[in-house]
Image (tube, grey):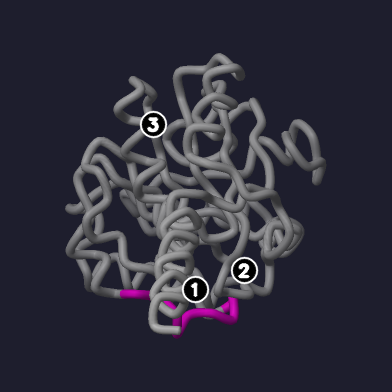
Amino acid sequence: MAKMGLDRQEALLGKAEDEAATLRITECFASIQGESTRAGVPTTFVRLTGCPLRCRWCDTAYAFSGGTRQSIDEVLETVRLLGLPTVCVTGGEPLAQPACRQLLTRLADGGFSVSLETSGAVSIAGIDPRVVVVMDLKAPGSGEVERNCWANLAHLKPQDEIKIVLADRADYEWAVAVVRNERLFERCTVLFSPVARELPPAELAEWIVADRLPVRFQMQWHKVLWGEARGR
């Protein structure tokens, strides 16, 4: 009986280790990067499944569940076959899966230029320094402002980026206060983006110019090109 119990424990441990070395993937595809300072760059996207947040304006709710479990080697082979040197790991919230960190390192080891899109609700400590982290700060309009992990600010590198998506003037004023109080302009690039179909892009641009903010205005160019189509 003791031997059977030990065998079962070892089997469960082995299963846990196997799952830790795999990822649940919603989709992998080649497209044009629509956001960040890499906007316009042909990019392979690896979209991981699952997210602990439920932002009001989320446009990738289809990635909350489902997907297929793949080994890191399988993901790397798909990325290689897609044939682009730039890779973006996104979600969902990719860091909700522990093996994401290993995937990021393996991609960098493979010679790819790698970025990570993360909600800012999960710690970014210890991510491979070769990876460019594009981290959200959730404004009140998202409904998830309380999920911001403020300790992440200490882990940002100069090449990283902070993205704040804004639904209205109240969100904008919140964002301006945060970036000034935290001196985020001095840490890394700060991106302000309007919620599609809620905040007119020109209005946000005018606010930024009027306040002489050293931020980068951005839109989701993939939506301009392809609308809400998946895998684009």
**Residue at label 2?**
167
User: Is residue 90 something one can see in this rendering?
Assistant: yes
Q: Position of residue 143 (x, y in %)?
A: 59, 81
| Quadrant where the image shows the C terminus | top right
Earlier in the chain: of badge 2 and badge 1, it is 1
Which residues are the magenta region? 141-149
Q: Amino acid at mark 1?
A: Ala
**Residue at label 3?**
107
Q: Amino acid at mark 3?
A: Leu
Q: Which mark is residue 139?
A: 1
Q: Marks 2/3: CA distance?
A: 34 Å
Q: Is residue 182 above or below residue 201?
A: below
Decide: marks 2, 1 in contact (CB < 8 A)? yes
Indicate whether residue 147 is drawn in magenta: yes
| Quadrant where the image shows the N terminus | bottom left
Q: Marks 1/3: CA distance?
A: 31 Å
The structure residue drawn at horizontal position 49% and vertical position 43%, both measured from the top left corner, is: 89
